[in-house]
Structure formats: C-alpha cells, structure tokens
Image (spheres, grey):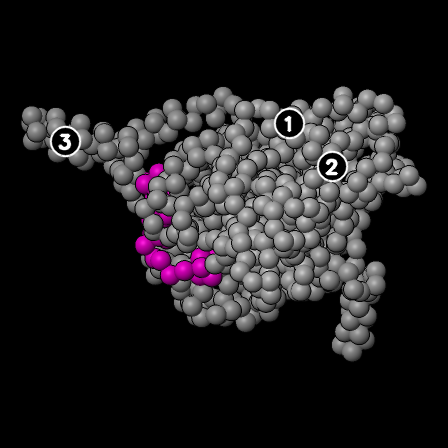
Amino acid sequence: MQLSCSHGALQGLGRPFSRSFLGAYASRSSNRPPTLRKSLCTMLPFWLPMLCDVRRCRRSSALQRRFGGALQRRVSSRRLEIQQNDFALGGQKHRILSGSVSYFRVLPEQWRDRLEKLKALGCNAAEVYVPWNLHEPQPGQFVFEGRCDLLSFLSICQELELDVLLRPGPYICAEWDLGGLPWWLLTGPDPVPLRSSDKDFLTAVKRWWDELLPKLEAFLSAQGGPIIAIQVENEYGYWGTDKDYLESLRQMLLNQFGSDCPLLFTSDGTFWPDLQQNGGLDSMLRTANFGSDPQQRLQELRSAQPQGPLCNMEFWIGWFDAWGALTGKSFRDPSDVAQTLHNTLDAGASVNFFVFHGGTSFGFCGPGGNLSSVGLYEPQVTSYDYGGLLDEAGEVTEKYLQCRKVLANFLQKPDLLEKTFPTARRLPESPPLELESTLSLEDALPALTSDGATCIKSAVPLPAEQVGLGYGYIMYRAQVPSTNKLPLTFGKDSIRDFASIMSGGRVLGTIYRNDSGPGCREFELPEQGCQLEVLVEMMGRVNFGPALLTERKGLVGPGRVQLGTPFTGPMRAVLGWEILPLPMEEQDLARIPWGMDVSMGKRTSRWNRGPRFYRFALHVQQPADRFLALDGFNKGFACINGFNLGRYWKVGPQRSLYIPGPLLRRGRNEIIIFDIDSPSCGTKDAPPAPRVVSKPIWSSGMLPEGAKEAAASVSSFFKSWTS
C-alpha cells in the first residue's frame, strides 16, 4: 500500500515559487553550453530545497517575529512516517498517545494549563480541530485573534514538546454548529452540495485553506514544528462516496506544502463495512473511531487496511449532552475507560482521547445538534464537558487519574503518578444578585436596530440565512387581516428552533421545533386585524448527517404561517412580512437604553410575560472561575462584561453556565441576561435573579441524583467479587 507521506524531494515543485523558478531556468538554459546545463540539472535536487527554504522563511518571517523562540526547531526535521505496521517519528518507532483539546472552546489564558495537564498525563500529542465557521464568519473575512488565535495555541504545543494531529476539516463535526461549515454556505437553493466535489463548494474551501495553510508552514514537522499529521475531511464514510472530493482536498494540501506535507490520514467508524472504504483513499492512512471493544474494532480496521499502523483516532471516553435529555448528564465509569485504554494499547494501537478537554461552546455559533432516530431535533447544551479527562473548568477527574495509571505502566514512567494538581480556587457562592435594570425587547428594539440594519420586507417569511443572518435571533412581523376568528396555525417544522408568538405586546405562547400534537401550533388571536410578532431563537444547526443540507433557521418551509386549520376550510397564508435580524452581538447589547429604566420603582416594576433583558452587577475582589445559576429564568443567553457565555434552558440537564476567571475583573462586573420567554412578575412575585455558585449544577433527568454513579460502583464491586 502506498501511503501519502509526501516523501519525494521534488514534490514541492508544484508550489508557486518552484513553478516560477523552473520556468525561468528552462527559458534561459537553452542558451547555455550543454555542459553547464548538465551541471545545473545535476545540482538541482541539492540547491532547490534551500531556495524553497528561503521562500518559506520569508513567508514565515512574521510568525518568527511574533512568536520568537517558540518556533525554534527541536531538530532539523521530524517526520511521522509509516514503517510496515508501525509509526516512526524521526526514524524511531513511535506510538501516538494523544488527547483532543478544542482551543476555540477555551480562553487563550487557559490554554497552557490544559496542555500542561495533557503532557503530565503521559501524552505526546494534542489532537486539534479547526472550525471554519469561527475563522471565516463572513465570506472572505478571516479571524485569527482571541479564541481563534490558532498560531499561539500551536506555539504553546511547540514549547511543551507536544506534537499536533491537526484536523482542519473543512467539515469537523465536533458537536459544533453545522459541523464547522459556515452558515453562509446555506444561502443557495436546496439541497446545498456540501462536502462534495461541487465547484462552488470547493472554491469556498480553497479560499479558506489558501488563508489557513500558509500560516501553518512554520509549524510543520518537516520544519521542526509540532504538526506531524493532518486529517483530510472527517468521518466522510458516514456522508458520501465522492472520492474525487477527497482527492481534491488531498491535492490542495500537497500543492501547498509540497515535500513538507505531513502524514495525511482519514478517520471513520468501522461498524459498517463500507465506512472505511467510503471515507478514505488508499493513498492515505485510515484510522478508526470507537469507544469500546477495541479488539473487534481494530480487527475491522485491519480488514479495511491490511497494512499500516493501527490507530483509534477518537477513543470516546464520554459523550455529549442534549437539552431536555431524560437521563440527565451523560456518564461513563472511569474504570471502564481505563480498562478499554489498556486493551487498546495492548492490541498495539495508537490512541487519541476524545475528548481530553472539551471546554465550553460559548456564544451562538458553537453547539450543534442532531436528529434522533425518530426524527426529533436534539440540540446540544452549552457545556462541552463530555465526561472528558479534564472537566469543563479544566479540573483533573477520576477518569484522568485512572488513565494516567495505565499510561504510567505502559510507558514505564512511574514518576508520572507523582504530579499533583490542586483544585483551582473558586469564589464563594453568592446570594441572588440584585436586579439593576430591566427592559422589554419591545422597548430595546429601536436601539438594537439603530446601526443601519435594514428591515427586510417580503411577501412570505424568509429563512435567516437568506437575509444575511447566521446566528442569534430573528423577528418576523405581519399585519393579520380581519377574519371570522380563524385561529393562527404554524406549519410542521416551520419553527427553527424556538419561537415566542406575540400580538399587541401580549404573548400568545411559544413553539419548540419538536412540538407536535393537537393544538400545539395553533393560537387564538386577541382581535381582528392585529399585528403578529414572531421572535425566533436560532439554536445549533445539525452537525451530523444529511440534515446539514437543509438546516436553515428562522421561519422555514411551505405553509409557515396560515389562518385556519384543516377543519375550518381552506387555509389562508399570512402575507406581507417585515423581517428584523437580531444577532445580539456585543456591540448590539451595548446600545440597550438602560437609561429608560431610571427609577428603582421602574427597575422592580411588574411586567407581563415576554422577551426581556436584565442587568445585574457582580462585584469581585479577586477574579477566579465561577458558575452562574439561572434561577427563575426560562430560556435565553447570558453575557458577562460583554462576553456571551452561551445559552441556558430550564429543561436541563445543564442548569448553570461556566464563567472563566479571565473574563472577570476586580470590582464591578456586568451581567446581562436575555430571556425569550421571561416569566411575568406580579405584585407578589420576586424578579428572577441569577446567583454565583462554585460548582456546576446538572439535573439528573428521570434517574435520582447519583443513580448512574451508584450503579457503576455496584457493577465494579460485582466484577471484583466474581473475578
């Protein structure tokens, strides 16, 4: 089997510098004496790489100035290669021991702490996804600062001598909105030809990679950097069979990196025989994703790839969580994880913990969703704790300690067990915070739309993507014609994903995407000829499976909003809509006119149910990590000092939001909460108020608190007693 490791010394001739140099050489050499031409041709393989290095150095000079000593080579060249059924790194037999770290779900100030703990586990590599949608929020607009500062993250990996398995997509899954694909790919007609050799899709991918890949050159292992391998696509076997698409991505990488290109690989499940075949190419290494039964899964991988090293690229040590999950937070017994790790290593495979540290899907463009086997939408919660070896706040877990014992024994490094990790300081819990000010969405709306945003007018409601909105909320308004008291009806699957239905400032009710059954999408209008307002919260786009092709947000599909029901005669569509995009970004929230709420009486006044903003103050003496419990709130998002912590929802199982310490400052910190379905506040009702807690709060669903952990303990005891 021929694997694409880019070993040919002249493979880099496809690069722009090499093409221009060879063109100049060819045009001039015909006038030179034959002996001189022969000498130059003989010397070409020796001095061309040096000239390419000059070009490479010029391209990366800005990186050298930025990172200084962080980019000094460990050795002149460190290549991950394939030697029969083993990996070899720098010519030495090598086993990859890696952990997944999502840099974009962790604040930059915390990156080093998480990576140092990965190193202390006994791992030699970090597996790193790159989310396209976060780095290119608008076509041609690229972001590489803050949480998107991938180069600084790679620099820390370099300093800690951690290799990197880079997974730049373009699709990454990762329980991330649309699997990391940008929302603006959905502006065309259905079905959108995502993840295919479609010309327009590949053009968009090339524009993105033309921006990303040159930035990575100084970090390639051939240059002494940490990137030893790059994944081509992600779990493509679950999606399609377009080999031309995979080959196009492979060629983009080879054309950019030439002879410096790291080892290229794919990863897929092995549960169905065609997954590995559909998702890979014979010119690249195939790896497997699984969480248990390594002997069986590795045997299936060997059947798909008769020769080459075995690697579990995603060792699922936990699972993600969805809003409304009946079983509460996912759980996996640490001893089961440790035993599976031992069996995987014993079978001779390399392994990547998925996830080592997940972090938090801050903001709106993070957490994705799935469609269940019965077609229900399952949006993921804000926390990406995942049951990782480090929890959401970066603390070492029992799972970490048990896996470290396995790795210490495997590596014959008992000193790994001597490292201790004191729990980070948490600020004490607070009483409910005092409400400083509150404002209805109706009162705040003029300020939220005062930046010149156009009110779009359309005969029918348009999806958010078609009016240029990727994330946040969207308001639809229409004048309902006078009728004979016909009810208002929303079509099936018309709401993406949660809506507050209002008329004349009064909330008629809410609709969730999964709602079904008699009457749940029907509303009685308060009067004839009233104005209808529909505020839609756009939750995470499906990140796995064919639903990616049509995963638009807002009001979608035929028969969106009509008057009447199938039992009242012909139904009449509501026409003539105004559409207001509400991205709810930091600059938008900064324009909220809190000054309208000046008196204490006004701040604590009674109000009716409906979308509403709240402002609280949190006073801190010494910043540290905390969690925000949203007592009394229903559904929305919370910000601290302008930073969007993510979504909350009273259905659980997540009942609090993580506040990273670096977001806090000494003194006053501002908390803003927006609730799309804020409860009414009567004369005897206390306004809802958040509080700060030192530990995350999770509900347990149908099972009593601690039941799953207790069952695992009983199972472990039974196994030890019967063995």
The answer to whether residue 595 is above or below residue 162 is above
Can residue 173 be seen? Answer: no
- According to the image, label 1 marks what residue? 446
Q: Which quadrant of the structure image shows residue 332? A: bottom right
The crowd level at tag 1 (other Cα within 10 Å; few <14, some 14-19, many 20+) is few
Residue depth check, mark 2 versus mark 3: number of the one nearer the observer: 2
Front-lying residue, 446 or 27 = 446
The answer to whether residue 258 is above or below residue 109 is below
- According to the image, label 3 marks what residue? 26
The image position of residue 110, as x and y in percent, is 67, 35
Of the residues shown, which amino acid type is indicated by label 2? Arg
Residues shaded magenta: 235-258
Give the secondary structure at mark 3. Answer: helix
The image position of residue 495, as x and y in percent, is 59, 51
The crowd level at tag 2 (other Cα within 10 Å; few <14, some 14-19, many 20+) is many
- According to the image, label 2 marks what residue? 612
507 relative position to 154: left or right: right
309 relative position to 260: left or right: right
The answer to whether residue 586 is above or below residue 172 is above
The crowd level at tag 3 (other Cα within 10 Å; few <14, some 14-19, many 20+) is few
Q: Are marks 3 and 1 in contact (CB under 8 Å)?
A: no
Report the residue at 85% width, 32% height from top.
605
Magenta residue check for 472:
no
The image position of residue 123, as x and y in percent, is 61, 48
Of the residues shown, which amino acid type is indicated by label 1? Pro
333 relative position to 572: left or right: right
Report the residue at 84% width, 27% height from top.
602
Q: Which mark is residue 228?
A: none
For the N terminus, give its image quadrant.
bottom left
Q: Earlier in the sequence, mark 2 or mark 1?
A: 1
The image position of residue 23, as x and y in percent, is 18, 31
